[in-house]
Image (tube, coloured by chain):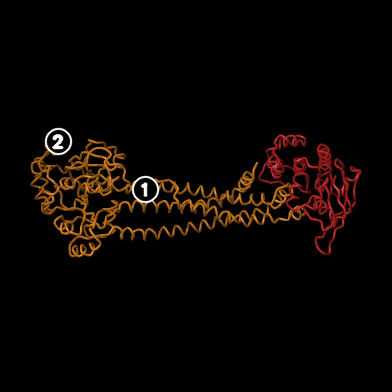
Chain colours: A red, B orange
Amino acid sequence: MIKSTGLTFQYYPTTKFRFPDIECQFGEHLLLLGESGKGKTTLLHLLAGMLQPSAGNIFIGDIETSALSGAEQDKFRGKNIGIVFQTPHFVESLSVEDNLILPQFLTGNTINRKKAREVMDRLRLGNMMHKKPSTLSAGEQQRVAIGRAIMNEPVIILADEPTSALDDHNAEEVIKLLEEQAKSANASLLIVTHDKRLKDRFPKSIQI
Amino acid sequence: MNLFKIAFSNIRSKPLNTFLSVILLAFGVGIISLLLLVENQLTEKFNRNIKDIDFVLGAKGSPLQLILANVYHVDAPTGNILIEESRRIVKDIMVEEAIPLAYGDNYESWRIVGTNQKYPDHYTCKLKEGKPFEKAFEACLGIEVASKTGLKLGDTFTSMHGLDAEEVTEEDHHHDTKYTVVGIYERSESVIDNLILTPVQSVWLVHEHQDEEAVVAPIEAEEHVHVEGEEHDHAQEGDHIHAEEEDQVHVHVEGEEHDHAHDHDHAHDHDHFEMTYEELAAEPGREITAYLIKKRNKGAMGQLAKKVEGTSMQLANPAIEANRLNQNFGLGMETMQAIAILIMALSFISVFISLYNSLKDRRYELALMRTMGGSRTSIFSLILLEGLSLTCIGALIGLVLSRIGLLILSYFMEKNFHYNLTDMSVLPAEWVLISITLGVGILASFLPAAKAIQIDISKTLSNA
């Protein structure tokens, strides 16, 4: 379960974001809707522990993540949170396969290449394992990014506008994948978006 | 998967930047380490050869040339001096030891030096096999000479005029008298390794028919036939014969000696070949190329120098001349060193810039690694490792380059001077060089690494 109460964040004294409280059980899907400039990405970064809130608390399971130190948050995030960004980024010099096992390496988990292979097969990208990420199409890259997000079997998957850069067909595919992967890992799926196409798919949504 | 693999993939993914940094570093390290190697080995060789020689007594001319020719055996001698004249110096109370050196011939470009047992003894050169040379035309070979020419104990060879094979004129200027190999020395890492030693008498006797200058510079090539019967007379007269008279002598000799040339080997049994150094040296007009002199005490130089004044001889101090050579040589070394340090500085700047620039393109992936659980330490180590890998590869290639350079240099030195520089082991100074290089390499990557861990991951990834 992920839960936030009374979250605020201030970039400058003049701009202050106040976010509605969020609660999402494990296995549940939650859509966070909002127009540009409402602080959607900021909220996602707060939930991921990449930013420190000005006020309020965040709980993931029994742990108050907003109270952890920077280094502890890095570690916690690596082990428990999978993040899919709007534009997928990779370590360009490494192959798709090595990019997939990178989260395992960076969190100090045992490296499991078999799992990388399984994930890629599930994403129907099994033949792309040894390619460089930059040689893949945008849709393929986003799929690899999703695969990477679940490599450490996170309890929460955070997705930031995962479909806004994609056409209908690819967007549909990516969303389906996200749902599948979240389900298979029994993780909470939180999607931050302004993409209207997703509204109807998810019964539970919060307007920011 | 480990940080090193990621670092390595990263530097490999930018081949041009990597190439530039590595090649600059390799050349910088290569030049410096080559200079260190050459300086070290030459100095060592030079000093070993000077060993306890206080002066060299020889003909007037360049003192440096006198030293190079007689101590290092790399230049032509300045000429010859008369034994009579030199005796005043050599027999001086201030002289503890004087080793005679007489030049004139070579065998396949290996110098034949007429001397006595004191010469190998001076370099504590022991015989590997055979016995010491005693009689005229007995020869002991340096280990290099033996291994390169393939001459073995009991083999005979004829000498050729001049000091190097190149000096020989169209028609080979052979002497017919055969030298016999009676001994081969152990390796001493001194000049002896590259010399053929024989009693001084051999050099005198082989040139019996020739005009004095011929001892140093080869004259018009002509077969000189040894004349057993008359040899002795010639020995006494020969030195007084002027150049113009030489032809006359030859006519006289060749006319009747053609047949005798065949049973020439018997010459060794002949009386005058048995004459001792002292007997031959006592003959007027005898010449020698130089003496290596060990002084008895400190004041010797002034006293001996006074005695040399006004003669056709000079006394040269090997230490001073070697030092002068080193200074001239050293100037070139310093210039090279300065250039190499400049190249190395450029390479460090290149490492720094390529890492720093790559941060711009890679800030997303570095931020991403942080979101995937990568700690600041990991990111910092990654950048340091990249810089360090570049430096290591560069330094390693540099060491290899310097060895290749040394081999090439050694090849030419060997060809021209029979000097070889083949000690490939890493010098202590080179370890220092490598440590400094790696240290500066780390320093050059420190700033980029520090910058990398300051990346604001949230800002970087939301601006994507």
Disc 1 crowd rating (10 Å Cα; few below 14, some 14-19, many 20+) is: some
- Which residue sits at x=59%, y=50%? B16
x, y percent for residue B201? 16, 46
Q: Chain of mark 1?
A: B
- Which residue sits at x=12%, y=49%? B280
The residue type indicated by label 1 comes to Phe
> At numbered mark 2, what does the secondary structure look like: helix, strand or loop?
helix
Give the mark, 2 or 1, whose residue is nearer the N terminus. Answer: 2
x, y percent for residue A110? 70, 39
Q: Nearer the viewer, mark 2 or mark 1?
A: 1
x, y percent for residue B200? 18, 48
In the picture of the structure, the residue carrying the numbered disc 1 is: B412
Number of labels in the image equals: 2
Disc 2 crowd rating (10 Å Cα; few below 14, some 14-19, many 20+) is: few
User: Along the horizontal axis of the image, is B102 left or right of A53?
Assistant: left
- Which residue sits at x=20%, y=64%? B303
User: Along the horizontal axis of the image, is B345 left or right of B133?
Assistant: right
Label at residue B360: none
B119 vs B397, nearest the viewer: B119
> At numbered mark 1, what does the secondary structure look like: helix, strand or loop?
helix
The residue type indicated by label 2 comes to His
Q: Chain of mark 2?
A: B
State whether residue B109 appears in this view: no
Q: Is residue B70 above or below residue A178?
A: below
Q: Report the quarter where the N terminus of chain A lies.
A: top right
- Which residue sits at x=77%, y=48%? A87
State whether residue B15 appears in this view: yes
- The CA distance from mark 2 to mark 1 is 39 Å
B328 vs A43, nearest the viewer: A43
In the picture of the structure, the residue carrying the numbered disc 2 is: B262
